[in-house]
Amino acid sequence: MTAAAVPSPYGSSRPFVKYQFDTAYDEMFCAPGLPREYYQALHRTLVGLPPEELRKSQQAADLTFLHEGITFTVYGSKEGTERIFPNDLIPRIIPAAEWAKIEKGLTQRVTALNLFLRDIYHEGRILSEGIVPRELIYSCKHFRREMRGLNVPRDIYVSICGTDLVRLPDGNFVVLEDNLRVPSGVSYMLANRKALKRVFPKMFRDYGVSPIDHYPQALLSTLRTLAPENCAYSQDPVTVLLTPGVSNSAYFEHTFLAQQMGIELVEGRDLLVHDNVVYMRTTAGPRRVDVIYRRVDDDFLDPLCFRRDSFLGVPGLFNAYRAGNVSLANAIGTGLADDKAVYAYVPEMIRFYMSEEPILPNVPTYMLTDAAQRQHVLENLEEMVVKAVGESGGYGMLIGPQSTKQQREEFRARILADPRNYIAQPTLALSCAPCLIDGEVESRHIDLRPYILMGEKVTLVPGGLTRVALRKGSLVVNSSQGGGSKDTWVLRAGNAEDRTAQIADDVWKGLAGGPLA
């Protein structure tokens, strides 16, 4: 994993007195005490502020989240389920050139995933040619035989995607996993930005940060491109967001996005199907629905087709979908490409469908259905991260270096009982970034979840959700496991990257007036 930590070079200087370095890539520093060029203004500001001022600034950001009801749900917690989403005050900065590579790589990846899903549910060329094993696909619980031969609008199965990236010690980004079913977190990305613009208004403006505020409208435009051909209102298709309800962990996000897009937030009981057409119940009578942005898993969408005990979906929805009278985003059956074992084959998908080399590589992944790879993992569990292929949110996972002997033995038994349900990866030294912890700046591990939209074209808002493992030494960034998030600043080319020194001087001179006003 990582070597012993290097003490902070700041001595007793606040607020970096507790800051430590190890073998992980440090986002702010290229060497202890030496900030990267594009972090210099931010670093100088932090060094010049007393801990009490930083605490007040963090409290101001927290109050923004509290007043706007920015929450998430933790299931099974003794302290209660509803919590304010943890946010860190110090932004993560990405230069324009780095972002350009990320954007290109994610565009390539989402294109290949859509080609793969179209192929799997139609011709199956990638299976016939032996690139991806048939048994891997047909044993996946998210493979939907009902989708075989069914055409979806524009052949787009994945129109909304959140892909998790991590930066390795060599400075390069790799893909940790894809989130294709109902990717969440984008509302927290927007909320972090809103809070930081209030806390650091001058620095935000001077840095030349690329905007992300247009995401809701970009999402709405993407959804509208999926409207059925027989849509009654071709210029303004009726679009709704289908939520499981208030008890869902991402309900805040559902309400937020529906409000920002200006569309109706509905539950299954608000919709009905008649003659294979979906209608929304309104006070003025039934209104036809053309596009559903669904935040409900496949299993619960239609009790007549999938789980019969579901009260979250709409009876008859799949028949209306199959008849081409309503569109769903994302399409039913996209969870197949969400499977962490299928993830291992994405580089081969890119080569097969696009005749290109992957721009963003995968993390090396061990397939536990293979006897030799399984034996290697079982002999080295203390060095591995083991993941259940269909879980998310940090559940169903073993982090070897931070596990107990009992936990490793439990996972050994699970793997032997059902090897198809698990994959393993080497434990990665995720990059670190400065975080404000009790008024002082400390180093914490982070990842990055950019959000990709695919409609008439592929769209990425510059940035994404930087998730933070707030617990010292932890590698788990999920909010359900004690993680939080921070704003991600993607710099515009030729702005802050070329003017860092001037920005630092301007901010330093303005400290008396307070950049935190």
Image (cartoon, grey):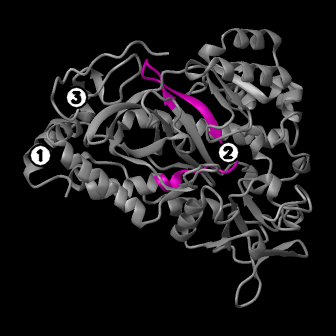
Q: Which of marks 3 and 2 is in front?
A: 3
Instruction: Name the amino acid type tagged 1.
Output: Asp
Instruction: Name the amino acid type tagged 3.
Output: Val
Tell me how far mark 1 sits from mark 3, CA to CA: 25 Å
Question: Which mark is on residue 180?
Answer: 2
Where does the magenta region start and end?
166-188
The reply to whether the magenta stretch includes residue 185 is yes
The image shows residue 276, relative to residue 477, as above or below, that is: below
- Looking at the image, which residue is at 60% across and 61% down? 251
| Residue 319 position by quadrant | bottom right
- Looking at the image, which residue is at 23% across and 31% down? 16
Q: Mark 1 points at which residue?
A: 506
Mark 1 or 2 closer to N-term? 2
The image shows residue 85, relative to residue 258, as above or below, that is: above
Tell me how far mark 3 sits from mark 2, CA to CA: 41 Å
State left or right for residue 80 relative to residue 242. Answer: left
Q: Where is residue 462 in the image (x, y as percent from the top left)?
A: 44, 46
Q: Is residue 197 visible?
A: no
Q: Name the residue under label 3.
A: 17
The kind of secondary structure element at disc 3 is loop
Q: Where is residue 68 in the image (x, y as percent from the top left)?
A: 43, 66
Mark 1 or 3 closer to N-term? 3
How many neighbours does mark 2 have within 10 angstroms: few (below 14), some (14-19), or many (20 or more)?
Answer: many
Question: Which mark is on residue 483?
Answer: none
The image shows residue 233, relative to residue 308, as above or below, that is: below
State left or right for residue 505 relative to residue 361. Answer: left
The residue at the far bottom in this view is: 284
Tell me how far mark 1 sits from mark 2, CA to CA: 43 Å
